[in-house]
Amino acid sequence: MLGAISGPVSPVPGRPFATMRAPDRRPQLATQKELSDFLAQVERRAFKQAVFAVHDDAAALDIVQDAMLKLAEKYSARPHTEFPMLFQRILQNAIRDHFRRQKVRTTWSTQLSNLGAGGDDESDPLDTLDVEDDGNVPDSPAARFEQAEVMAFIEDAVKALPDRQREAFLLRYWEELDVSETAKVMGCSEGSVKTHCSRATHALAKVLRAKGITL
């Protein structure tokens, strides 16, 4: 009489028993093709969405391209089903960042005409810049056009600044780095950053007044 068989029995005689594994229920990570297909499908809709928000085709294109790049760089390995929600979150943050930069740039541009007289070269005008919560972004198309013209003139004037003044100005005002971060990028002291920024803003204010531009 055969004795009792203990333990599992291999379904295939002569072969060791194979342990059955539970199916892998983790979501499949996106492939490169799935990412490319998603970006191709969403690009036009995202551009229209950004245009409606910022009322500027060039700015909207920059926003969408930045959002697409960020999705590809940071979330390409996520499941493709998560792409729509992730992309919308990135796009909305990019739009909010655009308006925040507009508020800062508009605020300091309206104060440039008051920065040319006197002042301490060791002070950094951005340290005392007060950006209103509701911002100063014009509502009407005419006002936005006028502001764009002034900003374009300021950008041309920035190009004429000495190299170190221009670098400090752009890092502080355009890129919104703080004094410490700017000093590290430029490889100089924080005092030098403040001096460069102060001289740059005073020079720009002088140029604006000479052109009869009042802000």
Image (cartoon, rainbow, N blue to C red):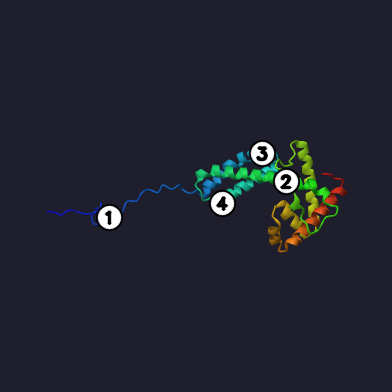
Distance, label 2 to label 4, CA atoms, is 31 Å
Kind of residue at disc 4: Lys
User: As drawn, which residue projects farthest toward the left?
Assistant: 1
Callout 4 crowding tier (Cα within 10 Å): few <14, some 14–19, many ≥20: few
Distance, label 3 to label 1, CA atoms, is 63 Å
Q: Is residue 82 left or right of residue 200?
A: left
Residue drawn at 57 percent across, 50 percent down? 72
User: Which of the marked residues, 2 or 4, is nearer the chain's N terminus?
Assistant: 4
SS at circle 4:
helix
Kind of residue at disc 3: Ala
Tags 2 and 3 touching, CB below 8 Å: no
Callout 1 crowding tier (Cα within 10 Å): few <14, some 14–19, many ≥20: few
SS at circle 2:
loop
User: Which of the marked residues, 3 or 4, is nearer the chain's N terminus?
Assistant: 3
Q: Is residue 35 visible?
A: yes
Task: Determine which residue is flagged by label 3.
Answer: 53
User: Which of the marked residues, 1 or 2, is nearer the chain's N terminus?
Assistant: 1
Distance, label 3 to label 4, CA atoms, is 24 Å
Could you say which disc has been placed on residue 17 in the image?
A: 1
Q: Quadrant of residue 140?
A: top right
Task: Determine which residue is flagged by label 4.
Answer: 74
Kind of residue at disc 1: Phe
Task: Determine which residue is flagged by label 2.
Answer: 131
Distance, label 1 to label 2, CA atoms, is 72 Å
Q: Nearer the viewer, mark 2 or mark 3?
A: 2
Q: Nearer the viewer, mark 2 or mark 4?
A: 2
Residue drawn at 51 percent across, 45 percent down? 80
User: Which of the marked residues, 3 or 1, is nearer the chain's N terminus?
Assistant: 1
Image mark count: 4
